């Protein structure tokens, strides 16, 4: 396992698990940063598996970023299209009315 493989093991697995265990009781902001880091490391992992087959040395092209943006854009468009067609709260659930009432102290 080369340096790149060790980088993936440490930062895609070990550090993330340690932060996740420490952040179980943490604020949502910490978990958002952790999810963003996981997404970034997943992209690095996919790059690590695919790129050496086509280039023996490290090569980063604008096409790589265009593919990520394009696929992410398609996924977000599909997600928001489906989000508009469905209710965000359960319509017939008894807890829904309690959630919509203003908070009283």
Image (tube, helix red, strand yellow):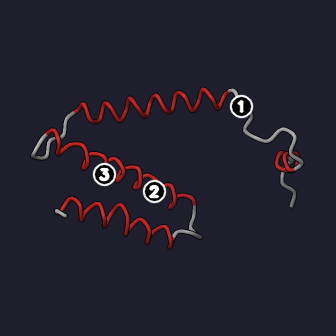
The residue tagged 3 is 45
The residue tagged 1 is 86
Report the disc number at residue 33: 2
**Residue 39 appears left or right of 95:** left
Counting from the top left corner in percent of width and height, residue 101 is at 86, 47
Quarter of the image where one finds residue 15: bottom left
Placement of the C terminus among the 4 image quadrants: bottom right
**Residue 53 appears left or right of 86:** left
Quarter of the image where one finds residue 63: top left
Mark 1 or mark 3: which is in front? 3
Real-space CA distance between mark 2 and mark 1, rounded to the nearest whole angstrom: 28 Å
- Vertical placement of 74 versus 11: above or below? above
Counting from the top left corner in percent of width and height, residue 39 is at 41, 50
Nearer to us in this view, 48 or 79: 48
Counting labels gives 3
> The residue tagged with tag 3: helix, strand or loop?
helix
Counting from the top left corner in percent of width and height, residue 16 is at 41, 65
């Amino acid at each position: 396992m080369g340096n790149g493989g060790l980088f993936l093991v440490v930062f895609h697995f070990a550090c993330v698990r340690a932060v996740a265990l420490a952040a179980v009781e943490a604020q949502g902001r910490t978990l958002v940063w952790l999810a963003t880091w996981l997404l970034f490391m997943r992209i690095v992992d996919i790059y690590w598996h695919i790129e050496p087959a086509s280039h023996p040395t490290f090569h980063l092209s604008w096409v790589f970023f265009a593919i990520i943006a394009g696929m992410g854009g398609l996924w977000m468009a599909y997600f928001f299209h489906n989000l508009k067609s469905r209710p965000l709260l359960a319509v017939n659930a008894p807890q829904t009315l309690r959630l919509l009432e203003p908070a009283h102290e």
